[in-house]
Image (spheres, grey):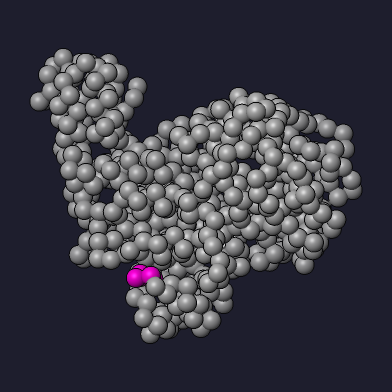
Amino acid sequence: MGGKRSKVAGMQQQAARVQSNIKIAPDVFIISFRRPYDFKAGQVIGLTTSGKIEPRLYSIASGEQDEVIEILYNIKSDGLLTPQLASLTAGSTIYVTEPFGEFLGTLEPSFCLASGTGIAPFRSMFRSGYGEKTTLIHGGRFRESFYFQDEFAGPGYIRCISGEKLDGAFQGRLTLYLNQLDKLPPDYKYYICGSAEMVVDVRDILIKKGIAFNQIMAEIYF
Amino acid sequence: MENLFGKTLEELKTVVNELGLPAYTAKQIADWLYKKHISSIDDMTNLSKDAREKLNTSYQLGLTPHSKVQASVDGTRKYLYPTTNNNFIETAYIPEESRATLCVSSQVGCKMGCLFCMTGKQGFQANLSTGEIVNQIKSLPEFDKLTNIVYMGMGEPFDNLRQVMNSLDILTSNWGFAMSPKRITVSTIGIVPAMKEFLENSECHLAVSLHTPFDSERRELMPIQNVYSLFDVLSEIKSWDFGRQRRISFEYIMFKGFNDSNKHVKEMARVLDGIKCRVNLIKFHPIPGTPLLGSDEETMESFKNALSAKGITTTVRRSRGEDIYAACGLLSTKELIKKDDKDY
C-alpha cells in the first residue's frame, strides 16, 4: 500500500461557485461549476451546500477536458440536500470533495447500461473519448427521461421507454430489451449504473445470458 | 401519530419541553420505554395523569410485535417485523450454549448489490427508523435472554448512519438499555466517511465485509469497491487503535476457486499487517442465479490454519438457520414487496 493516499477518509471539501443550475426535466437538474480538480471519466465527487449537510456522492457527468464539472441530479422530496441544491443560482457557493472512484471508462468494446440519472458517468466517458466501441442502452419511463440524448444519437444508442410511446425507442423496460436479445458478446465489458434494484436485475440477466461476472462492473446510487 | 419508542433522551427532552411537562419527565419516560415492559403510555404510572394525557394526544408507544416466526432445527428463530409503508424486515435470533445473539436489520432491502447476497436481490425499499431498529430487540420474545446484538441483518448500517447511531445510543446509554458496547457489533461493507464517524462516536465493535484482499476481485463481488476501495477502508482502520476495548473483525465468505487459494492467504496477511484483528470465515449459502460456489469444509479449515500460521486470529463461523433462510446473506422480504413503477 506504500505511496498511495486515501482521498475519501476526511472528505475534505473545497468551495466552488455555481455557474448554472438548469432544470432539464421534471425534478431533474444539471448543476455546473468551474472545476477545482482534474478527474477521470466515471469518477464521483461529494457535494453539499453547507457544512451542516453531509456531502452526497454524485457521478461527474461532464468530460475530462471540459472546463466545468457538471452534475446530474434529481430532487428527492424527503431529502435534505437536493431541494436546497435545486434552489441555487449562478454565483451560489457549493462545497465539493476531490473526485474519486474506480468505475472508469474503457477503450475496450463495451455495453453501458443505465437507468434514469445513471446515465451521468457514461456521458462523462463518452465526452472523454471512451464511447467509440460502446453500445449505450438507457432505460427510462418517459421521453424526457433520456437526458443528453442529442449527444448520444447514433446506431450504438438505444432508448428503452416503459411509460409511453416514443418513435425510435424500444417499447418496454431495459430488462425486457436485454431479455429479448439472442446473445450478448461474452468478451465485452458490461457497465451498469442505476438504482440497486436495476443493477441486480440487469446483472442477473447478463449472467443468465452467459456473461462472466468478472466482465461486469456496476455503480449503484446510494 | 408519532412514536415515543426509539427516541433518544435528548429527543424526549424536546418532547416534554414542547408539551410543557417538567424536564425530569424525559428520564422517567426513557425508563418506561427502555428498562421496563409496558404496552401503552397509560402504563407509565409514575407520570402525572396530566402528563399521560398530553403524551396520548400526540404520541403512541410505538412497539410493534412480530407478525411471523420460523424455527430452525438448530434453534435459530427468524422473526418477521412489519415496518412503515407496508414494508417488512427479518431478524434472526441465534441461541448458543453460552450466549444468545440477535442479528438485526437496519434497512428494508439494501442498496449495495453484492453478488452473493439475497437481501441485495430485493433492491432498496426504505431506511429503518431508530424505533424500528430497536423494536427488533425490545419486541423479541427472547429479549430477556439476549446477550449480544449484531447489525448484520438486512441493509448496510452505515447507509443509515443517523438512525443506527441513535439506536446504539439507546442500547448503550445508562438511561437506555445500558448494554455494554462490547456486546454489540456493527457490520459494514466499508462506507468510509460513515465508518469514520462511527469510530469517533461509538465504542461498539466493528466488522468489515472483506471477502477478498484483491481490489479487482472485490470489485466483481461488491460494487461499493468502485467508490470506497479496500485500500481506503483499511487506511482508515489503520489510523485507529483497536486495543482491548474495541474489536475489529473482517468477514470473509469463502467461494470455491475464487478467494480460497494460498495467494489469498498471502495477500490477506499483507493487507491486514499492522491491524490487531480477527478474520471470520463464513460458509457461502448459495442464492438463486448466483455464479458462485461455496468452498468445501476442508478448504475452509486449511485456509483458517494458513491464516492462523500467519499470525491472524481466524475462526470459521458456524452456519446457523440455513433451513429457514436465516443464515448469513439469506435474509429477504422480496416476496412481500408491493411492486412500484420502475424507472428502467
Q: Is residue A48 or residue A149 the one in the foreground?
A: A48
Q: Residue at x 47, y 46 (%)?
A: B159
- Residue found at x 17% / y 31%: B27
**Left or right of residue B213: residue B147:** left
> In which quadrant will I find the C terminus of chain B?
top right
Residue at the left extreme, as displayed: B46
Point out the stretch of residues depicted in magenta. Answer: B275-279
Q: Is residue A51 left or right of residue A183?
A: left
Residue B168 belongs to magenta span: no
Which image quadrant for residue B14?
Answer: top left
Q: Is residue B9 above or below residue A11?
A: above
Tell whether B208 sits left or right of A90.
left
Q: Nearer the viewer, residue A104 or B128?
A: A104
What is the quadrant of the N terminus of chain B in the image?
top left
Q: Nearer the viewer, residue B233 or B113?
A: B233
Q: Is residue B167 visible?
A: yes
Q: Main secondary structure of the magenta part?
A: strand
Q: Residue at x 45, y 68 (%)?
A: B252
Coordinates of residue B189 in the picture (x, y in percent) = 47, 57
Name the residue: 54% across, 56% down. A7
